[in-house]
Each structure stands twice: as structure tokens, then as C-alpha cells.
Image (cartoon, rainbow, N blue to C red):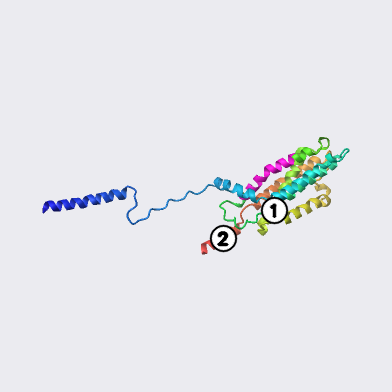
Amino acid sequence: MLGVTAGAAGGRDDRRGRGARGHGSGRPAPGREPRPRPRPTPSTVGIIRALVLPVARTLPWLPLAAGGTVGLLLVGVPRLVSGETADWVALLLLRGAALAFGLGLAFLMDDPARHTTAGVPVRRAVRAGLRVALVAPVAVGWWTAALLLVPEEVRPPVGDMTLEAAATAVLALLAGAAAVRLWDEPEPGQATAAALLLTGLAAPLLMPDRWTLFVQPHVDRWDEAHRSWVWLLAGAAFIWAACLLEPVRRRRVRAVFTARS
């Protein structure tokens, strides 16, 4: 009897040992589901890479192409017209070309799916910066072609004219970003372009002489006017960057509704 009892006790001990080894080996216990592994959080760089193609497809390429075509036609006029072209005519056409391309850039912030993409885990500044980064090479190539179309003998100073074109482009971006921030408009392009066109046509006529930015080349005030263009570009870029920030009030309202739900 003692041998039988000892054998039974030994069998129970062996089963307990095997059960303990089975639970300690990393296998799930019978009747218990394994814990799901946490998914890795995608990085910001990975999200931006994933957004490149969708954002590129939603860019307003048609208005950009229309504005760029009109601008190139304007600066190509001196090469199509026989005879010499005056310096002030070439300057006026080049400024008109910069304004035409700026009208195309005014549509850059148009995004019909803006309210549906608000949940993308990147900030508004990143999304807007991505749109600008995709268009920047096109803008640089277009402006280079516009400068080369102007005959060299009547071509204004390239650096100063590039400064004017950059300021015009940033003002167009600023108008679109301000419309999105103030009114949360998904497609502010038409209103922005109209306001930019009206401002571009009225500013040379209504601006006082001491504030004028649109001077003729080879005059004493040329350098002074372009120092003003530098300040205009810096101020417009600063305000544009400020408009790209997420509205604090809207974030607080969303947080309150999320907490209540």
C-alpha cells in the first residue's frame, strides 16, 4: 500500500512539474487568449512619405498651369514683336508674369477634402509645407524660363526681380492660408486670386510715392525700393507661418467634446 501511495504521489508531482514548465515556457495557459502585441506607432517621416502621392494628386495643377502659361506669354512678347523693346516695358511684363503665376499659387491651399483629412496625425503646417514643397521645383523652373525669355539687353536685374517674384508668391500663399484659418474655407482659391489681382493692379496706382515699391530700373530709388521688398517678403513669410498653426480654440473645443463623449 505504501508503494502504491508513493507512486500516485509521484505521478501527481510529475504532472504539476510539467504544468509549471509549460506555463513558464511562454505558452499561453489553457483557456487564456494571448495578449495582442502593440502596433508600432508610425513616425512623422513615414506619414509624410505616405502623403506625398495623395497630396500631389490633389494639387491645383490646372490653375498653376494657366497662370504659368499666361506669364510666359507675357514675357515672350518682346521676342515676338519686331524692333527694340524699352526697359520699362520688359520690367512691366516681367512683373505681370510674376503676378499671373501668383494667381495660380493662390489656389494652392484649395483642398476639397480638408475637413475629412483633419484627422491625419500631422499638423496643418506640415500638410501645407508639403504642398509648397511639391510646387517649389515647378515654380523655380518656371521663373528661370521667364527670365530667359526676356531679351538680355533689356532684362532687369535678375536678383531684384527674383525678390519681387518671391514676395508676390508668398503674399499669394499668405492670402490662401489666412482664408483657411479665419473662415475654414476648403477652397478659397477664387476669392484669394481675385483679392490678389485687385491688390496687384491697385497698389502701383494708390501707393504714395514715398512708399512705392514699383520703381523703374536705373533710378536712384531702385535699391531703396528693393530693401522694402525684403521687409515685405520677411513680414509676409512670418504671417504666413503664423496662419499655418493650429487654432488653439478649435483644439480646446475638440478636446472638450472628446472628454464628454
Disc number placed over residue 254 in the picture, else none: 2
Q: Label 2 to label 1, Cα distance in Å?
A: 24 Å
Overall secondary structure of the magenta section: helix
Q: Is residue 226 visible?
A: yes
| Left-right relation of 194 to 183 | right
Local secondary structure at mark 2: helix
Vertical side of 148 occupied by 192: above or below: below
Q: Nearer the viewer, residue 217 or 190?
A: 190
Nearer to the camera, 224 or 92: 92
Q: Does 114 appear above or below 170? A: below
**Among the 4 quarters of the image, the one containing residue 82:** top right
Residue at the spot of label 1 = 176
Residue farthest along the top direction in this orientation = 153
Q: Residue at x 55, y 63 (%)?
A: 257
Decide: few, some or many residues near mark 2? Use Cα within 10 Å; few <14, some 14-19, many ≥20: few
- Determine if the magenta segment contains residue 98: no
The three-letter code of the residue at mark 2 reads: Arg
Q: Residue furthest right?
A: 83
Residue range corresponding to the magenta coloring: 126-144
Q: Determine the image quadrant of residue 78.
A: top right
Residue 77 x/y as whole percent: 83, 42
Where disc 1 sits, the SS reads helix
Pick the residue in front: 198 or 59.
Answer: 59
For this view, does 26 lie left or right of residue 106? left
Q: Nearer the viewer, mark 2 or mark 1?
A: 1
Give the x, y percent position of residue 226. 77, 42
User: Is 132 in the magenta?
Assistant: yes
Residue type (three-letter) at the residue carrying disc 1: Gly
Image point (61%, 54%), residue name: 246
